[in-house]
């Protein structure tokens, strides 16, 4: 074997914008650049979710078996404290600018949020919008099931009762039904984020979308993918039946300068300079009642997104051309700034504090190990905390009622 292929050298350089980058160079000339900002961002979020899951969410796990509704109420607020962290880091430390136009969110409103999936990071960037216009504790995300296995992040998502899917409707329908019925039964006001496109916009996904359009005589899109409407219509109808839906928020997200497509771009320090959100609110009583009309309604929104994004990227790269004024947020910018600073302070101190406790006290070390084992085993045996939570609720409160509905 060529020994030079194993030789790795490291160098630190300062870019023109003041960014410190670490270059890893192999003997064959391959160079990998890693940003210190990117490393700090990823590690801060990971350790926050890891220690937060163990020391903030872990102590309340037994409450799931006593009163799932209280468990859900507490967990929503605990998880929301972590959701402020990426918002704070992006805006305060990395200078990301967020511009929101269109309709406002009504605080506490129950809604389904549909958004184009431009990058794999859209769901995280949306927290910058919701922190100002809504309550972060209300948001639930529909996302792929493999993410629940990620230590820290996945544990917190399970505890937050996010809806994990396998992208096969025959496998996902029953789980959708169970989770939505549970939220309706406990009168949980949620804002469920769905990406009808199913995946982020790339060359490969665009090619598949255009192939689908050609086979079905549809318009080919450049800035969005053709939406899959089955899951969307099912969720809206189910929430409507459960009287747990006030509106649908149609959000268009755009990045006028650089587009961080994946987590790797963030690791390289490629944070978006600006994120633009255009919000269109549709009250539930304005939505079509039939399944077919609701599917057409969703497809129409994506036609509008294509035109809106074309005008955005080919024009002045903002959404002001829509003619709608910027809606003032329900939270003042001073309040948002205070929350962001407190979030950075809290999570900066939280990690070292728990590490110190683990080092000093054997009881804390045993708790730390036991909770990690519980998080890992429960996912492999039962499928996740949200599955256990649902089973506990059925057993304690609604089992006869739900069994009767299943038989019908």
Image: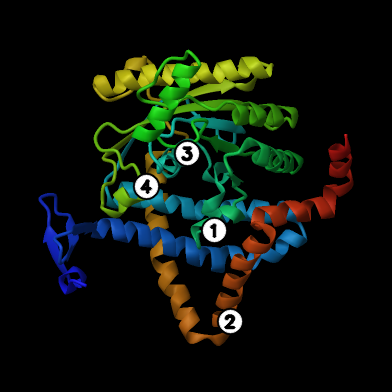
| CA–CA distance in space, label 4 to label 1 | 33 Å
Q: Residue at x 15, y 67 (%)?
A: 27
Neighbours of disc 1 within 10 Å: few (<14), some (14-19), many (20+): some
Residue position marked by numbered label 1 in the rendering: 149
Residue 276 location in percent, x, y?
Answer: 35, 31
Position of residue 107 measured from the top left corner of the image (x, y, whole percent): 55, 35
Mark 1–mark 3 Cα distance, whole angstroms, equals 26 Å
How far apart are labels 2 and 4 at the CA level? 38 Å
**Which residue is denoted by mark 3 in the rendering?**
130
Q: Secondary structure at mark 4?
A: helix
Mark identifier at residue 366: 2
Marks 4 and 1 close (CB-CB < 8 Å): no
Report if residue 285 is visible in the image. no
Near mark 2 (Cα within 10 A), the count class, few <14, some 14-19 or many ≥20, is: few
In this view, the mark in front (2 or 4)? 2
Q: Are marks 3 and 2 in contact (CB under 8 Å)?
A: no
Q: Is residue 292 left or right of residue 218?
A: right
Please give the residue where the numbered disc 4 appears in the rendered image: 337
| Nearest to viewer (mark 4 / mark 1) | 1
Give the residue at x 41% y 42%: 120
Residue 408, given in percent of the width and then of the height, sits at 88, 34
Instruction: Return the residue nearer the eye: 250 or 186.
Output: 250
């Amino acid at each position: 074997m060529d020994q030079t292929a194993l030789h790795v050298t490291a160098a630190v350089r300062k870019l023109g914008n003041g960014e410190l980058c670490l270059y890893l160079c192999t003997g064959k000339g391959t160079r990998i650049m890693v940003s210190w900002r990117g490393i700090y961002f990823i590690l801060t979020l990971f350790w926050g979710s890891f220690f937060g899951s163990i020391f903030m969410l872990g102590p309340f796990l037994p409450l799931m078996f006593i009163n799932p509704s209280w468990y859900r109420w507490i967990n929503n607020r605990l998880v929301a404290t972590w959701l402020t962290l990426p918002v704070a880091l992006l805006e305060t430390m990395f200078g990301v600018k967020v511009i929101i136009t269109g309709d406002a969110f009504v605080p506490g409103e129950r809604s389904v949020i549909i958004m184009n999936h431009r990058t794999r990071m859209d769901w995280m960037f949306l927290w910058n919008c919701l922190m100002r216009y809504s309550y972060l504790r209300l948001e639930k995300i529909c996302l792929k099931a493999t993410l629940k296995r990620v230590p820290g992040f996945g544990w917190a998502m399970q505890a937050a009762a996010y809806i994990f899917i396998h992208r096969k409707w025959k496998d996902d329908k029953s789980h959708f039904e169970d989770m939505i019925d549970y939220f309706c039964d406990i009168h949980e006001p949620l804002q469920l984020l769905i990406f009808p496109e199913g995946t982020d916009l790339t060359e490969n996904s665009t090619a598949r979308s255009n192939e689908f359009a050609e086979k079905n005589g549809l318009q080919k899109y450049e800035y969005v993918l053709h939406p899959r409407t089955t899951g969307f219509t099912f969720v809206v109808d189910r929430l409507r039946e459960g009287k747990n839906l006030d509106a649908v928020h149609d959000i268009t997200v755009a990045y006028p300068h650089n587009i961080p497509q994946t987590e790797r771009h963030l690791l390289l320090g490629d944070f978006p300079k600006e994120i633009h959100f255009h919000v269109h609110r549709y009250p539930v009583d304005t939505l079509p009642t039939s399944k077919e009309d609701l599917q057409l309604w969703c497809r129409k929104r994506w036609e509008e997104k294509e035109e809106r994004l074309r005008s955005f990227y080919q024009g002045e790269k903002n959404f002001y051309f829509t003619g709608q004024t910027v809606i003032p947020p329900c939270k003042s910018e001073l309040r948002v700034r205070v929350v962001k600073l407190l979030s950075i302070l809290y999570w900066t101190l939280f990690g070292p504090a728990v590490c110190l406790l683990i080092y000093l006290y054997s009881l804390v070390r045993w708790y730390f190990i036991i909770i990690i084992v519980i998080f890992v085993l429960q996912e492999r045996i039962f499928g996740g905390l949200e599955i256990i939570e649902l089973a506990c609720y059925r057993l304690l409160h609604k089992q006869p009622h739900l069994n009767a509905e299943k038989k019908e």
